Image (cartoon, rainbow, N blue to C red):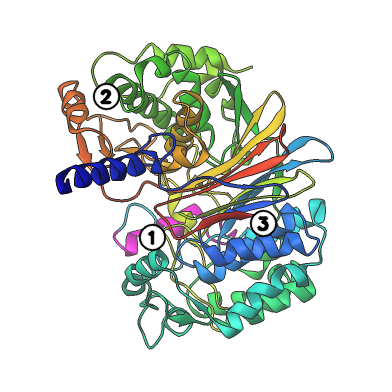
Amino acid sequence: MKITSFLLALSLCQFVHAVDRVTGRVDATRSETIAPNAMAATSQPLATQIALDIMKSGGNAIDAAIAANAALGLMEPTGSGIGGDLFAIVWDAKSKKLYGLNASGRSPKGLSYNKLKKELKQLDREFLPPYGMLPINVPGAVDGWFELHKRFGKLDMQKILSPTIKYAEDGFPVSELIAHYWNLSVPRLSPQPGAFVEHFTINGKAPKKGEMFRNPALADTYKLIAQNGRDAFYKGKIARAIDLFMKKNGGYLRYEDLAEHTSEWVEPLGVEYKGHTLWELPPNGQGIAALQMLQILKNFDLDAMGFNSVEALHTLFEAKKLAFEDRAHFYADLAFGKQPIQGLISQNYGKERAKLIGERAAKRVDAGNPALYEGDTIYLTTADEEGNMVSLIQSNYRGMGSGVVVPGLGFVFQDRGQLFSMDRKHANVYAPGKRPFHTIIPAFVTKNGEPYISFGLMGGAMQPQGHVQILVNIVDFGMNLQEAGDAPRWQHFGSTEPTESSTSFLEDGGYVEVEDGVPYQTIRDLMQMGHKVRYGLGGYGGYQAIMRDSEQGVYYGASESRKDGMAAGY
């Protein structure tokens, strides 16, 4: 009798566990968040709550996105801040149209190529360094906020920034993963010029998980911006403080660089994939690499191959290699030279590149000839009851950026200039007043001309690879919004970088890192095909997403299970 009862209890336990994940995917971490009026998904729960509070108090998705970005600049300085740049895609419910904003900054006009070359020679370097003064460009984020606000915002900027100002003054508890990255950054950045230690450590150390952290200097900076607008940053007290500090400490950024800065409204570029259109922004970002991959992948039946199958993964890896060689050679600031963008994302070019995918892993991969076909980081997304949706990404690059902090301002300058090439023949070669190649990319999906998914997946070169994996998981493999982000990911390394020589190409095939969910037998089979594969514990990006169900009039939210954040709505 006891044995029978035990077996019955065991079978009931097995039954309970079997239905814990309704769709049967053992890697699914939780259900999607579903709400009728509004949704926000960010990488820090307090920032998500701020976004919702802004919308509850009469603001729209644009106001909420700015408020959340400001909060993340305080709460997640390991990936963002007003010393960095911003890109956004906005679905405007009134005009029923997508708008793209490139709010990235340019290199100092007083730093010529020859002068930079001399500086690098003194440092015994061939490429720009990751830290210090040389990789600093004009920060574009604040101007990006005000461009978004001027065109689409509802609440005044003081109300939008006030929640973060209060947290900056009173303090907030640092979340787990952010504390981890903060701790890694402090030894690298503490020696840099300025007040990094004063503003971003507690007695010389990074704050620990759960420890309260305050940044009153950033609160004062936000107050100036809220009261006096974007000119407070680019033409007022903040700009003058930056100019004075740079002159005293060997930097090249000047008042004139800040005063002359402008953002650019751009037309998003889209590629149709099995009834869904993925939209990305044109270069100087890397978003169209995802579009190039899709144009290659539509020539294969991934659905029939199956999720995590040898055939599907091989095809995805090879498509990435092909797209990234073009990324290394053609993606640059379009104001400094025409590039064959329409050719790169054309269906016919994708079809020709797809023919290069064979049964074995390619070792050598060159850039193509798209002219023949011519005709780090935080990510957040918000959506409101009017139907507006915002896909926004913002970064200092390399986590906390250059390490340079002007005393009293409370933010770190980005080091995005490190992504310039020093090869004079390269499209992405350094020049004064030029925007460098950018890794941060927001994404948006429409379906039948209607808004469908606002999403992003932060993390350097992982981003276009991640965008494609998310869309393929949803479209080809039938996953829901949360499962698409929870599913095991892969990342290919070794492609030519936009900082390298114009004659460089992939010679050894690179290697791929995969998460634990990829079966070992699959990895063995991929190795037999010539792929170098290894397991990797991190670096797979940070995913946030909102999906619009127009039939039911509700939003679905999903948040990265590998990060600290959350999706929430009301």
Residue situated furthest bottom in the rendering = 203
Q: Earlier in the sequence, mark 1 or mark 2?
A: 1
Q: Using the image as rendered, state which of residue 563 and residue 376 is in the foreground.
A: 563
Using residue 168 as the reference point, say whether residue 517 is left or right of it.
left
Pointer 3 with pointer 1, Cβ within 8 A? no
Q: Using the image as rendered, state which of residue 413 and residue 456 is in the foreground.
A: 456
- In this rendering, the answer to whether 404 lies above or below 462 is below
Using residue 166 as the reference point, say whether residue 457 is left or right of it.
left
Q: Is residue 117 magenta?
A: yes
Using residue 154 as the reference point, say whether residue 335 is left or right of it.
left
Tell me the residue that label 2 is attached to: 364
Q: What is the x, y in percent for residue 5?
A: 22, 46
Q: CA distance from mark 1 to mark 2?
A: 29 Å
Q: Using the image as rendered, state which of residue 148 and residue 416 is in the foreground.
A: 148
Residue at point 47% right, 61% down?
79
Choose mark 2 or mark 3, whichever is in front.
3
Q: What is the x, y in percent for residue 213?
A: 48, 81
Q: What is the x, y in percent for residue 346?
A: 56, 18
The amino acid beneath tag 1 is Pro
Tell me the residue that label 3 is attached to: 65
Tell me the residue that label 1 is attached to: 130
